[in-house]
Amino acid sequence: MTYLCSACGETHEDWPALVFAQPDPYRWLGDAEKTSFQAECDRNTCRIAYPQQTECFIRTVLVLPVQGHDVTLEYGAWLSVSEQNYHDYREHFNDNDHCAAYVGYLANALPDYLQTYDVIAKAHTQGGGLRPLLELKPDPDHPLVRDFYHGISFAEAQRRVDKILGARR
Ligand SMILES: [Zn+2]
């Protein structure tokens, strides 16, 4: 799949989204823990009932702009949300006109960044069966937040995609 980039006039290949199938706290659990914590994870939501507290997650879309091109690099990343927001999201998942925003922390370690669990973001529901779009809380000191607002270079985006595709082959 290729497309004509209106910003630079060249033809580019479509990039796949860089997807995390589950939030990291779920991946860390062994089978016995998954059972005792009643951990559930489907394609869009995840819930873990730890003995002390329950943690909930929703899968979202994080879009990084690419400097000088009308292409973006997409991550399928998870956000920790309150249990109330988790239920609200599930209840209205198929609604077209449910407009909500859920605030939480990123729940995946994004490669190429030292630390991403501390990034605060707001997930804006899109309706129509689309996953919510992330808006990162401004933080000039965080490399991922900087990239979200200022974009990454085309070469860097291509390198990240190639690395993921290479690992899948
Ligand atoms: Zn271009």
Image (cartoon, helix red, strand yellow):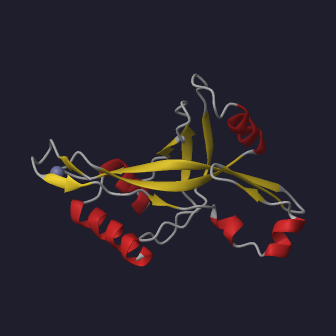
Give the quadrant of residue 22. Answer: bottom right
Residue 121 in the image: x percent, y percent? Answer: 54, 47
- How many labels, in total? 0
User: Is residue 129 shown above or below 154?
Assistant: above
| Residue 10 as seen in the image, left or right of residue 101 | left
Give the quadrant of residue 33. Answer: bottom right
Residue 116 in the image: x percent, y percent? Answer: 52, 63
Q: Residue at x 38, y 51 (%)?
A: 148
Residue 49 in the image: x percent, y percent? Answer: 84, 58
Q: Residue at x 57, y 25 (%)?
A: 96
Image quarter in which the C terminus is found: bottom left
Give the quadrant of residue 158. Answer: bottom left
Identify which residue, 117 or 15, lies in the foreground: 15
- Identity of the residue furthest to the top in this view: 97
Residue 142 in the image: x percent, y percent? Answer: 44, 60
User: Is residue 121 shown above or below 48?
Assistant: above
Identify which residue, 165 or 112, lies in the foreground: 165
| Residue 160 as seen in the image, left or right of residue 131 | left
Q: Residue at x 86, y 63 (%)?
A: 37
User: Is residue 95 shown above or below 164?
Assistant: above
User: Is residue 2 shown above or below 111?
Assistant: above
Q: Residue at x 29, y 70 (%)?
A: 159
| Residue 67 as seen in the image, left or right of residue 28 | left
